[in-house]
Image (cartoon, grey):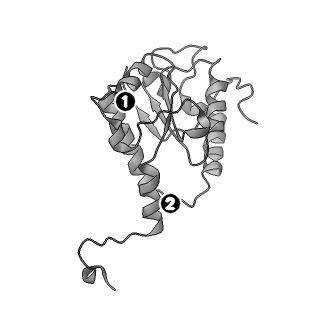
Amino acid sequence: MSESSLPSGVMTANINQLAGFLLKTSVWPATFGLACCAIEMMVTVSPDNDVARFGMERFCATPRQADLMIVAGRVSQKMAPVVRQVYDQMPEPKWVISMGVCASSGGMFNNYAIVQGVDHIVPVDVYLPGCPPRPQMLINAFLKLHEQIQNSPHAFNRKEIARQVEAAAMAETPLIEMKGLLR
């Protein structure tokens, strides 16, 4: 039966499209605010912005129930192992948004104490610029992430891809001692 001969109101989809739709409409972010960007992340879940329409209203306090980590703010060298540990505790599939210029590239903190980009620690799916980015920008990042989730094949081995990205980032990181990050 072709699509043109289907009765009105009937939709067709393959399993990959259905899995993408279900995954993108049930993303639960982990609460992981490190600096001033965390205030903007908190405002995003206020009634004015209504992220519940995207299925993201439940921010988790435990990484074992979250599948999205929003790294909001600068990451210090002392906090880097904690960021990695939280990421490792999240179930598959999982995604990361780097919120703010400090999380993405170290921002104005170009010194030994701040990690110059959270992508040295965890694989990042969406980079969100700004200092601090507005809640509307975070909602736009959610939409970009939803687009990635919907359009990506869901039968791939994300752990292996994350390991490859991590190995490439570690090869490019000059002389930063990453104690306990790689197991």
Crowdedness near tag 2: few (<14), some (14–19) or many (≥20) residues, C-alpha within 10 Å: few
77 displayed left or right of 47 = right
**Residue depicted at x 65% and y 51%:** 160
152 displayed left or right of 135 = right
Indicate the quadrant containing the N terminus: top left, top right, bottom left or bottom right: bottom left
- Checking the image for residue 180, the label placed there is none
Expressed as whole percent of the image width and height from the top left, the position of residue 108 reads: 45, 15
**Residue depicted at x 59% and y 35%:** 63
Q: Is residue 110 magenta?
A: yes
Callout in the foreground (2, 1):
1
Indicate the quadrant containing the C terminus: top left, top right, bottom left or bottom right: top right
| Residue indicated by mark 2 | 153
* Near-viewer residue (107 or 54): 54
**Residue depicted at x 64% and y 49%:** 159
Distance (Cα) linking label 2 and label 1 = 29 Å
118 displayed left or right of 139 = right
Expressed as whole percent of the image width and height from the top left, the position of residue 91 reads: 61, 44
Label located before the other in sequence (2 or 1): 1
Crowdedness near tag 1: few (<14), some (14–19) or many (≥20) residues, C-alpha within 10 Å: some
| Residue indicated by mark 1 | 45
Residues shaded magenta: 107-112
Expressed as whole percent of the image width and height from the top left, the position of residue 118 reads: 55, 29
Name which quarter of the figure residue 128 lies in: top left
Q: Secondary structure at mark 2?
A: loop
Residue type highlighted by circle 2? Pro
- Report the number of numbered marks: 2
Please say if 163 is above or below 19.
above
Expressed as whole percent of the image width and height from the top left, the position of residue 71 reads: 50, 28
Q: Identify the main secondary structure in magenta.
A: loop
